[in-house]
Amino acid sequence: MTQQIEFFKYQGTGNDFILIDGYNNTIPDLSNKVIQEMCHRRFGIGADGLIVLRKRSGYDFEMDFYNSDGFPGSMCGNGGRCVVAFANNLGLINKETTFWAPDGEHTAIFNSNKDISLKMQDVYEIKEHKLGLFMNTGSPHLVVFNRNIELLDTFTEGKSIRYNENYKANGVNVNFVEIKGNNISLITYERGVENITYSCGTGAVASAIASCIKKGLNSPIIAYTKGGLLKVKFESIGNNSIKNIWLEGSAVKTYSGIIKFY
């Protein structure tokens, strides 16, 4: 039996997602295998992840997020901005919104596709690990400081850390960070994608916070990624507590279409 799904493709600083409208439409169940096939860059649409926008009581919508491996993901900052832009495009929100995501409630402000501000969860536990600083910014992140990160084999190094004995049980996103004045350059190896991505929103947040704690940078901090720049703003309330965290950047629709399954 042939099934078809209308999809929309969005990207936030190169971190790209398949968006599906589950608010206005009834969609078929999406198995892990189907999501993997849709996200495959040679045999499918191609994306770092898939997001179904769903109804949720008490909120404007729910962000149901899956990594490209087909399994439910933790919070995704770039995906969060993309789903806000999608909700605006569908006419579900205007400028401000409150929605539900994998790590709970979020608020966001949509000024334009080039200017979306997403409020992130407060961070209350930052740990010093052997290789760098570890924290959860909606997803678990390890921040490793280096010089000349463009010269590093970040794929091999990131994969090695992600699967080492300390992290392989739950996985970790690995951020390689270089200080540039009061700004940072950032390359992230993402679990669930199992590759370097063009950008990582929760990674930018973790890297900015780590740069404040370890290198003395001050909010706001610009994070330069392969796909563009992100701005991170926050307030420090001690070495292990950060509040009022905002991730700012673009989220742009690139195309839409119909995918059929046979």
Image: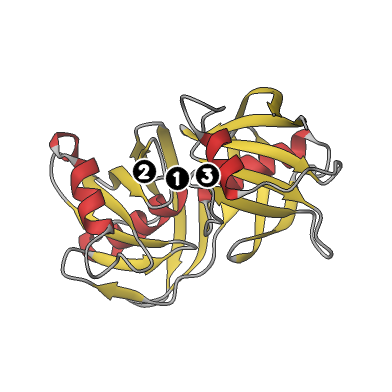
Mark 1: few, some, or many residues within 10 Å (few <14, many ≥20)?
A: many
Numbered label attached to residue 223: 2
Numbered label attached to residue 78: 3
Task: Say whether residue 34 is visible.
Answer: yes
Residue in the image at 38% along x and 77% along y: 125
Closer to the eye: label 1 or 3: 3
**Image height of 122 relative to 195, above or below:** below
Residue contact at pointers 1 and 2, CB within 8 angstroms: yes
Which kind of residue does numbered mark 1 sit on? Lys
**Image height of 225 relative to 139, above or below:** above
**Image height of 104 relative to 111, above or below:** below
Q: CA distance from mark 1 to mark 3?
A: 12 Å
Residue in the image at 25% along x and 50% along y: 159
Mark 2: few, some, or many residues within 10 Å (few <14, many ≥20)?
A: many
Residue in the image at 86% along x and 42% along y: 24
Left or right: residue 11 versus residue 211 is right
**Image height of 5 relative to 25, above or below:** above
Question: Helix, strand or loop at disc 1?
Answer: strand
Residue 142 is situated, as x and y percent measured from the top left of the image, at 29, 61
Quadrant of the snapshot with the N terminus: top right
Which kind of residue does numbered mark 2 sit on? Ala
Residue 128 is situated, as x and y percent measured from the top left of the image, at 23, 73
- Disc 1 designates what residue? 231
Task: Say whether residue 220 is visible.
Answer: no
Q: Which sits earlier in the primary sequence, circle 3 or circle 2?
A: 3
Residue contact at pointers 1 and 3, CB within 8 angstroms: no
Left or right: residue 146 versus residue 116 is left
Which kind of residue does numbered mark 3 sit on? Asn
Which one is in front, 190 or 100?
190
Q: CA distance from mark 3 to mark 2?
A: 13 Å
Specify the quadrant of the image occupied by residue 110. Answer: top right
